[in-house]
Amino acid sequence: MKRILLVAVLLVTFLNGLVAREGMWVPILLGKYNLEEMQQMGFRLSAEDIYDVNNASMKDAVVLFGGGCTGELISGDGLLITNHHCGYRQIQMHSSVENDYLTHGFWAKNRAGELPNQGLSVSFLERMEDVTTRVLEGTSGISPEEAEAKRNRNITAIEREAQENGKFRATVRPFFYGNQYFLHVYKVYTDVRLVGAPPSAIGKFGGDTDNWMWPRHTGDFALFRIYAGKDNEPAAYSKENVPFKPRKFFPISLKGAEPGDFTMVFGYPGRTTQYLPSQAVDLILSQRNPDRIAIRDTKLDIMNSHMGRDAKVRIQYASKNAGVSNSWKKWQGEILGLERLNAVESKREFESRFRDWAMDNGTWDSAYSSLFNLFETQYRDYAPLAKASDYYSEIVWSGIEIFTMANYFNIFLNQVERQDEISESAAMSLQRLVDNFFKDFHQPLDEEMFARLLPVLVSDLPSGHLPDNLHQVLKKYPGDNLIRNFYRKSILINQDRLNELVTSNSVKKFKTMENDPVFQLFRALRNHYDVQVGPLVNRIESDLESAMKPYMAGIMRMMDGKSFYPDANSTLRVSYGRVEGYEPRDGVKYKHYTTLEGIMEKDNPEIYDYDVPERLRQLYRDRDYGEYAREGKMPVCFIASNHTTGGNSGSPVINSEGHLIGINFDRCWEGTMSDIMYDPEQCRNIALDMRYALFIIDRFAGAGYLLGEMEIIR
Ligand code: ARG
Ligand code: GLU
């Protein structure tokens, strides 16, 4: 008996160890690579329950939300849940000092009260397909340039056919650096309305202080509803539209999950780079992340001081600040994680193993030695160019907002110059850009960005990467002189003058912009980058990218028999793992979940990020948890070992029976390097417990009427 028990225990431990938690898998290949393992881990359904073209499956309940998040359907009437931070921009756009939904939350009283959102769309994956053979058709035996052109023509043809005259959006994307190609066909709905959002003190509880960290207590969710035409097909916003009827929506389970339980995350991870050579990782670690962090230190310093002084500015810059702060903090965690994993060294070791393998089988000289040389020399040349590219991105293309406006006009003027007339639609879209810009613009803040960031360009980049006159300008106009002689002399921040221009319909008037001091500065930077820097950056990046194709194929050959997952590329993926805590450092063990008790421990009205709403305190004092508590406590968040990245925000966390138990919204600090190197011991995704979301909707917001349309598993 004892021996049987021992064997059983060993077997379980062995299986546990065997289970790979790393990977973002392709939905149509689950049956081939993953299902068996998923079922061993406890998953009770089939691959077709997740993805099926002919029958309703989970994929029909998951959407790409906006440009970079995930959302999922939770009712037959098009109700959708995603993260508060994914709907943040929309919530902010509807907010003003008088109607401050960021601070107080928003709950539509009825369907007529749901708020439309210009520019927001959700995409459903209709189907995906391996189109490698078609993409590569006719590309062998010709020059690399001809092959690329041919590939692009093939891709365009495949996409055009799949779009069915505009009925669908279709994209063909390379996987494994072009060793494989997949077509994705989407149906896109553009009438998506805001239904509800908790106050930021819940939806963003812990703010940027707790961001990327565990233990976490953020109620990071918001509700939207998809509307469609009477035929249930996509339609532009109209009062006549009706709630969309999805093929499938997720039942919500109140059962929660225990350590060891199977979970899967189904969503749209944005970008990972797991197969990079050591030189690339080194560049990120020693140059790119530190550079970008330092520039953002300055940006955040400026934003925070202005936002702290003025409630209006706080709302105007809330979303911009969250964006800048988010990557700033992640890059710092990533550096720590890569250092702890000794990532560069371990990549080098891998590369030397690869070399041995290729030498042994006689392919080194013919196939790989030149690749390894190329990595060595190209990354050396790339480093200064990447630096320039990072500085331009952080300072010129975003950061200094008057340059954003200059950019709008520069693009417009270039168009006008080519056509010699102003088209009505171009003028209208310019007008929209101008209007949106000024809604969230605070000049004193941007003046400070201008005065503090421009000198950083000059002090940190070699002069060859900047337009000639920039050094002189900065020398001649130090400090505030720069603001007085450039910024305040520019019409780019004068809304009335810009409106006059836009409505003038006169090419001649537009051309006067060319005398504007800031516009000139911007154009000089733009032109210098486009001529002296951009083409070099593009060439090296494209050479490196092309070199990755044979390298990747080589890695797969070397490790024949292992299942590989492609890097994230904003296409639908499945990650799976288990609910589990972790040990961040010696002597410390993290549990897998948090509760409302932790919110009350953090409660401090003096600290903006920890100021608990009085109503939530009251619910806590009364233990008024409805049916959502467990053992007298209100669960808030939990962690699991699902491999996720940016874009997985809002993704459903699904249990073994296909029920929704959580909404993914973050990763733990010690595991943020997982985009480059995954560590099963340290990498955890953070999810909001659905029970907390329902508790907030029901008990806190009194919006329990929304629960009526959900399917709740008790
Ligand atoms: N870190 C999460 C993600 O990458 C949440 C970001 C939003 N929250 C914030 N405090 N900025 O998107
Ligand atoms: N918060 C991220 C997002 O917006 C998810 C966290 C991550 O990077 O894993 O997608």
Image (spheres, grey):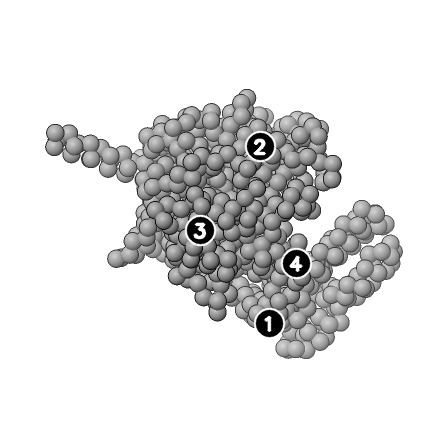
Identity of the amino acid at label 1? Arg
Q: How many marks?
A: 4
The residue at the point 68 percent across, 74 percent down is 483
Secondary structure under the numbered disc 2 in the rendered image? loop
Which disc, if any, is residue 76?
2
- In the image: residue 401, left or right of residue 688: right
- Check residue 99 in the rendering and tell me which mark sits there, or answer none: 4
Q: Earlier in the sequence, mark 3 or mark 4?
A: 4
Q: CA distance from mark 4 to mark 2?
A: 30 Å
Q: Nearer the viewer, mark 1 or mark 4?
A: 4
- Whole-percent x, y for residue 159 in the image: 64, 30
Q: Which residue type carries mark 4?
A: Asn
Mark 1 or 2, closer to the camera: 2
Q: Is residue 638 left or right of residue 704?
A: left
Q: Position of residue 682 (x, y in %)?
A: 34, 49
- Identify whether 504 is placed above or below 556: below
Q: Does the rendering let one see residue 693?
A: no
Q: Residue at x 62, y 67 (%)?
A: 311
Report whether the residue tagged 2 is closer than 8 Å to ligand 2: no
Residue drawn at x 54%, y 69% as measured from the top left: 301
What crowding class fits label 2: few (fewer than 14 Cα within 10 Å), some (14-19), or many (20 or more)? some
Badge number at residue 624? 3
Q: Is residue 297 visible?
A: yes
Q: Secondary structure at mark 1?
A: helix
Residue 255 percent coordinates (x, y) = 39, 38
Three-letter amino acid code at the position of disc 3: Asp
- Category of crowding for the residue at label 1, using alpha-carbon neighbours closer than 10 angstroms: few (below 14), some (14–19), many (at least 20): few
Quarter of the image where one finds residue 75: top right
**Mark 1 highlights which residue?**
309
